[in-house]
Image: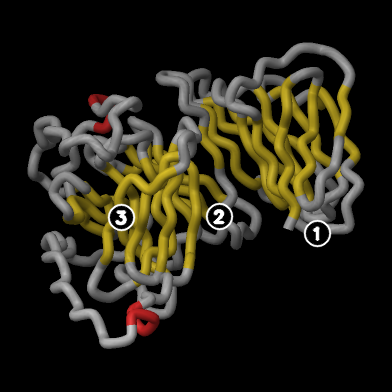
Amino acid sequence: MTTVSSSLPNPSRSSPSSNMSSPPLSPPPSSPQNPVFADDVDESDFAPPVSSLPHPAAVPRPPNPTLAVAKAPNLLHLSFNQDHGCFAAGTESGFRIYNCDPFREIFRREFEEGGIGAAEMLFRCNILALVGGGSRPKYPLTKVMIWDDNQSRCIGELSFRSEVKSVKLRRDRIVVVLLQKILVYNFADLKLLHQIETFANPNGLCVLSQNSGQMVLVCPGLQKGQVRIEHYASKRTKFIMAHDSRIACFTLSQDGRFLATASSKGTLVRVFNTLDGSLLQELCVESSCKEVVVDFHRQFNWSNGTKRCRSSRNIQPCFLSNCPVACSFK
């Protein structure tokens, strides 16, 4: 079992349009101070909050200016926020937040020592979920730390027996992905709500819809090539045999109605209706690459019509009617 903090602000009161470069937001009232226990994980004491770090002292310029060039920290992680307007980068020395259009760095947090292997944003508010990573992790790989950037400290944590593969956020939920299990927590008090057994998931595959009150979660099923769809509003579970080989990636449309999947072979992208599991379209991708990343266009709107694909180096934008699904090959 694990003890978790209950001092989290209510994420549903944070505006998605709040810019992280603006003055700090005033956190909403805190939840009750009683700790909450989850049945799934190891018992451990709640880690003390991480203090704000002072600005490092200015380093005197050496006689030769060419010697003053700083080495950029190694990149460990990249993830977009829920509306794809920003993305977070975890490095060997902290994390950085970037705006997409126009592209610019919004801010960064540099730690004296320790890397961040996962940094998950919650739209543009001050709350992030952090997991340690790199050669000197800032936090254990088995913990999810809830970071409040207004306070420059961690205000909660979740501890597990095995390594955390990824974290996904909604305003009302925190989803933690382990190798063969997914756990869904209430954001307000970190109460465990649901556990899902999965096929081996080393890449931490999991996606959430962002519509309020209509949460849809997609994760690997219990067989190779299978995906599981959870409709929490209607309390329905749907399994789809999407591919014969291992699932490489999948993505949901913003409203959770459509699912695009790709296998480890990287030759097919399939689009499904999440309500009934029906196959809507199948795209044949001409590529010798073994890995593919798919995503729906932000303004995706399904309509029947022809499909076409075009290739440019390692990026293939695949069009369903006039609505593109971007396919990036590695």
Q: Where is residue 201 in the image (x, y as percent from the top left)?
A: 61, 57
User: Marks 2 and 3, Cα distance to the nearest angstrom?
Assistant: 25 Å
Residue 9 as seen in the image, left or right of residue 76: left
Residue type highlighted by circle 2: Gly
Residue 258, placed above or below residue 174: above
| Residue for badge 1 | 290
Task: Tell which tag, 1 or 2, sits nearer the viewer.
Answer: 1
Q: In the structure shown, which secondary structural element does the residue marked by tag 1 occupy?
A: loop
Q: How crowded is mark 3: few (under 14 residues within 10 Å), some or many (20 or more)?
A: some
Residue 144, placed above or below residue 238: below
Task: Tell which tag, 3 or 1, sits nearer the viewer.
Answer: 3
Q: Residues within 10 Å of mark 2 (few under 14, many from 20)?
A: many
Residue 95's image quarter? bottom left
Residue type highlighted by circle 3: Arg
Residue type highlighted by circle 1: Lys
| Residue for badge 3 | 108
